[in-house]
Amino acid sequence: MRLRLTSKRDLTKRMLFYTGDYHQIIYYLLKKESPTKYVHRSLLTGDNHIRALDIDAAAEFSHIMAQRPNILLSGRDTLMDDEGFHL
């Protein structure tokens, strides 16, 4: 996915985005808060982390989506499969 912005002002204070399985440093660079406490992408996408930390990834993703992010960034072509959203 490519997102082109002319400046940081394109991302207003009210705009919310989720980096998903993409580069979480974007939050820092744009001085934005993550919509989840699981900022590093491997925490919600890596089976080992999900099991070790007992993370309910589906519930966390529902929590993220309930905040209605304006932008979803992903390193994948799609965030959905036949069973619905995946991280």
Image: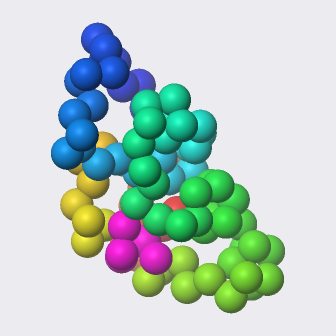
Q: Where is residue 36 in the image (x, y as percent from the top left)?
A: 47, 65
Total labels drawn: 0
Magenta run includes residue 31: no
Say above or below: 64 vs 58.
above
User: Could you say which quadrant of the image residue 59 lies in?
Assistant: bottom left
User: Could you say which quadrant of the image residue 55 lies in?
Assistant: bottom right
Say above or below: 13 vs 54.
above
Which residue is at a point 55% across and 85% down the rendered structure image?
56
Magenta run includes residue 61: yes
Q: Where is residue 49 in the image (x, y as percent from the top left)?
A: 75, 73
Which residue is at a point 64% across and 55% down the rendered structure image?
40
Which residue is at a point 29% across and 11% down the rendered structure image?
6
Left or right placement of residue 13 versus residue 78 in this view: left
Question: Is residue 77 in sight in this rendering?
Answer: no
Q: Where is residue 12 in the image (x, y as percent from the top left)?
A: 22, 34
Which residue is at a point 58% across and 43% down the rendered structure image?
24
Give the quarter of the figure containing the N terminus.
top left
